[in-house]
Image (cartoon, helix red, strand yellow):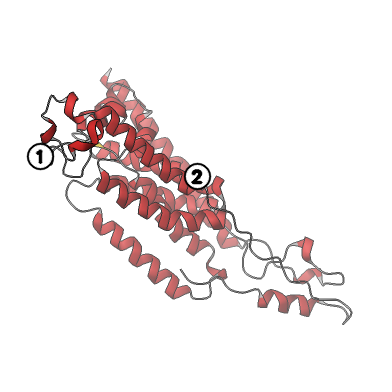
């Protein structure tokens, strides 16, 4: 991403707004940086969840297989299913389904809505888990450092649910697991954050080009067979809209009233956010609410029709 622009124009405004040479310059405070702890905790929770999944799976005893039939039998009940069952080094589909995988029939027909959230904490195998957690740490840590754990936590969970909703209506014959929807939500939020905070970026074209390449690579991965691309799209769209709502920053050159020196011409103060930011915030919020309500109402409607 491109560097954030410096505060030199804001200082020029301060200099222009002085009424006398006796006023000492008072630069705005540096941007607050949070310690990223939630994103690493989420990654750890996913790893622990996968360990529990393998413990429940118990390849040697659950399926009455010979120990040598499981992959890495020395791991005991944590051994992986044979490659013929799961090539990703993970549990069986039955175990994933029993622990909360996204299953259309169970979500819609049996009303198990909790699976919309539970499925984002499950992974099909070690390869699946590592790929998602590396992506999470790569994108999530920076976002949490800049915007804090509350906003990024909401972004992660809501994007995951958005991906689950779209996946639920797109894939009705298979089950789906993984944090991909939430991860694509972070990518979508990075794009909308760049758009809504455009004025504070110095290398705008470089930042946009870099981000678009990263997004394109991830979207291409989504079209690989047996990958739930609908969850990726739903999560990306949800995160893109949430970015406008949650990640809006003050426009370039804005000065907090707490840091304005005496004698400054108050007429030179720029508004905290510009009109374009407010319009994007309002539009994204409305579309987001309508989209989530539509998905949830559609689930309830189909449920009533089936019963």
Asked if one can make out residue 210 in the rendered structure from this viewpoint, the answer is yes
Q: Residues within 10 Å of mark 2 (few under 14, many from 20)?
A: some
Q: Position of residue 143 (x, y in %)?
A: 50, 56
Q: Which mark is residue 201?
A: none
Q: Residue 150's image quarter?
A: top right
Identity of the residue drawn at 36% across and 26% down: 300
Q: How many marks?
A: 2
In the image: residue 217, left or right of residue 62: right
Identity of the residue drawn at 82% across and 72% down: 265
- Give the residue pinned by disc 1: 84
Q: Which quarter of the figure is the C terminus placed in?
A: top left
Q: Residue 166's image quarter?
A: top left
Viewer-side residue, 173 vs 50: 50
Task: Tell me the distance, in whole angstroms, between the alpha carbons under discs 1 and 2.
Answer: 37 Å
Viewer-side residue, 273 vs 45: 45
Q: Secondary structure at mark 1?
A: loop
Q: Which residue occupies the extreme top position in the image?
A: 307
In the image: residue 197, left or right of residue 261: left
In the image: residue 89, left or right of residue 142: left
Q: Position of residue 304 (x, y in %)?
A: 32, 21
- Give the residue pinned by disc 2: 153
Identity of the residue drawn at 24% across and 26% down: 105
Determine whether 84 is above or below 22 in the image: above
Q: Secondary structure at mark 2?
A: helix
Q: Residue 7's image quarter?
A: bottom right
In the image: residue 226, left or right of residue 211: left
């Amino acid at each position: 991403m491109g560097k954030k622009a410096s505060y030199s124009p804001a200082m020029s405004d301060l200099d222009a707004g002085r009424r006398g040479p006796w006023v000492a310059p008072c630069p705005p405070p540096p941007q607050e940086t949070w310690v990223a702890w939630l994103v690493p905790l989420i990654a750890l929770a996913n790893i622990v969840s996968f360990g529990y999944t393998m413990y429940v799976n118990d390849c040697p005893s659950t399926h009455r297989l010979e120990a040598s039939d499981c992959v890495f039998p020395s791991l005991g009940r944590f051994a992986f299913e044979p490659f013929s069952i799961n090539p990703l080094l993970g549990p069986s589909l039955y175990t994933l389904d029993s622990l909360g995988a996204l299953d259309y029939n169970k979500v819609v027909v049996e009303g198990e809505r909790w699976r919309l959230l539970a499925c984002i904490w499950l992974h099909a195998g070690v390869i699946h888990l590592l790929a998602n957690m590396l992506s999470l740490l790569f994108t999530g840590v920076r976002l949490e450092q800049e915007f804090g754990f509350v906003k990024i936590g909401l972004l992660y969970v809501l994007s995951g649910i958005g991906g689950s909703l779209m996946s639920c209506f797109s894939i009705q014959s298979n089950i789906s697991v993984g944090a991909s929807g939430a991860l694509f939500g972070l990518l979508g939020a990075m794009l909308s954050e760049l758009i809504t905070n455009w004025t504070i970026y110095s290398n705008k074209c470089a930042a946009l080009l870099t981000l678009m390449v990263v997004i394109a690579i991830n979207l291409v991965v989504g079209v690989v067979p047996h990958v739930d691309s609908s969850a990726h799209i739903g999560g990306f769209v949800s995160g893109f809209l949430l970015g406008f709502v949650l990640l809006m920053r003050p426009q370039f050159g804005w000065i907090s009233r707490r840091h304005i020196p005496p004698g400054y011409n108050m007429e030179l103060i720029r508004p905290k956010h510009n009109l374009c930011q407010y319009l994007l915030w309002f539009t994204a919020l409305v579309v987001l609410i309508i989209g989530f309500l539509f998905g949830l109402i559609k689930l309830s409607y189909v449920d009533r029709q089936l019963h």
